[in-house]
Image (tube, helix red, strand yellow):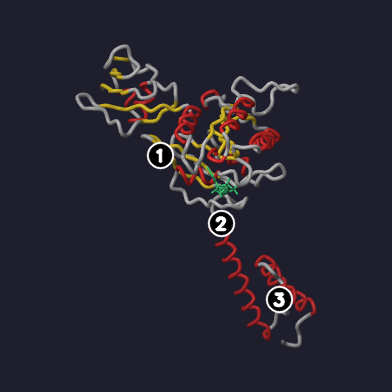
Amino acid sequence: MPANLTPEYEKAELRYRQATSDDERLVALQAMLSAIPKHKGTEKMQADLKRRISQLRREEHRAAQSKGPDPFHIPRSGAGQVVLVGPPNTGKSSLLAATTHAPVKVAEYPFSTVVPQPGMWHKDDVQIELVDTPPVTADHVPTGLMGTIRNADVVCVVVEAGEAALDQADMVLGVLSARGLALRSAPRNEVPAGDSSWRPALIAATKADLASSGTIEVLRDLYAVSGRQSPDGPRPGDGLEVVGLSARTRHGLDDWFRRLWALLAMIRVYSKEPGRPPDMHKPFVVPAGATVADLARQIHRDLPDRMKFARLWGHSRFEGQQVHKTEPLRDKDVVEIHE
Ligand SMILES: Nc1nc2c(ncn2[C@@H]2O[C@H](COP(=O)(O)OP(=O)(O)OP(=O)(O)O)[C@@H](O)[C@H]2O)c(=O)[nH]1
Ligand SMILES: [Mg+2]
């Protein structure tokens, strides 16, 4: 080491050697550069310090860019997004594994899921998005999970059918209610725009293959849609449907889908060209209450203006009845639009 280095430089160099992160290394290198005596004898060292500083800056920049999006932000796709929320080990990931192709980790030990994982559940001719999440406990809600839950269209509380079911459900409902979120088994189209105080929801009691059927009935009685009567007035989960199911035997999965679909408040409508049979494999999925004009808009942006009338098969008085574009549609209607 050249003799003319200052104690200040040497201190900075010591900090560099003992640094445990790139951040600390960068700060130390900058301190070394500013403390080094500026003369011909240290020119090489100065150049070397500058090179190391710019290399570290480049690496930090690259790391910041590759950090990528927030894993707790799950963009919506499909007819609606359902987030599974529950205590550890209740079988949330197993439900995704049973219904989707998502790469989920199922394990005998608790806390096996650490970040949310979406998957598409294709059933009949429609699809809904399920989101598996890391578990919640009375003392811990993973950072970011409330955002995932609020962003979803429907919340499915996943508990184990059995003795612990009631405590598990109460814990989850309590944790959400403490953060300002109530759950109700009412369809999505009843949530007023901009209201984030409640979400459409239901309780799924899993591992029903291990439980006696009575336990699901007890839960159902307690959370019945008519409301739980308690001396303290309504509780956070009053008015919640309960569905019993098993990822292992697949019992109850169809019923679960049907109820989730009802909460999402979507309808499927089939389009048909004049003189041709309808395409019964690819429905248009529109919100409940949508009209013929809404369907037309989904087919082509200009179609609502161009269309003259439609013919309707399904809920109309007679098959092929001529209807106006303001006609509201029902699930499984077949519509033929005439320009
Ligand atoms: N008998 C039975 N076992 C199940 C069922 N569903 C899940 N299990 C078992 O329960 C354990 C936990 O399942 P997971 O799907 O990993 O549970 P999880 O809720 O995702 O757990 P965390 O991610 O830790 O919160 C595993 O050993 C599964 O095999 C079921 O329907 N029946
Ligand atoms: Mg899991």
Disc 2 within 8 angstroms of ligand 1 (CB): no
* Residue 6 percent coordinates (x, y): 78, 80
Task: Please identify the residue farthest to the right as the structure is shown.
Answer: 7
**Looking at the picture, does residue 48 appear above or below residue 298?**
below
The amino acid type, in three-letter code, at marker 3 is Arg
* Residue 251 percent coordinates (x, y): 47, 37
Q: Residue beneath label 1, please? A: 122
- State which quadrant residue 44 falls in: bottom right
Q: CA distance from mark 2 to mark 1?
A: 31 Å
Q: Dot 1 lies on which element?
A: strand
The image quadrant where one finds the C terminus is top left
Q: CA distance from mark 3 to mark 2?
A: 27 Å
Q: Residue at x 52, y 44 (%)?
A: 74
Instruction: Evaluate if marks 3 and 2 touch, with contact meaning CB atoms under 8 Å apart.
Output: no
Q: Residue at x 28, y 23 (%)?
A: 337
The amino acid type, in three-letter code, at marker 2 is Lys
Q: Residue at x 55, y 62 (%)?
A: 62
Q: Residue beneath label 2, please? A: 67
Which mark identifies residue 39?
A: none
**Residue closest to the eye, 42 or 251:** 251
Give the crowd class for mark 1: few <14, some 14-19, many >=20 residues within 10 Å.
some
* Residue 314 percent coordinates (x, y): 33, 19
Q: Residue beneath label 3, please? A: 17
- State which quadrant residue 27 falls in: bottom right
Precedes in sequence: disc 3 or disc 2: 3
Q: Dot 2 lies on which element?
A: loop
Q: CA distance from mark 3 to mark 1?
A: 56 Å
Precedes in sequence: disc 3 or disc 1: 3
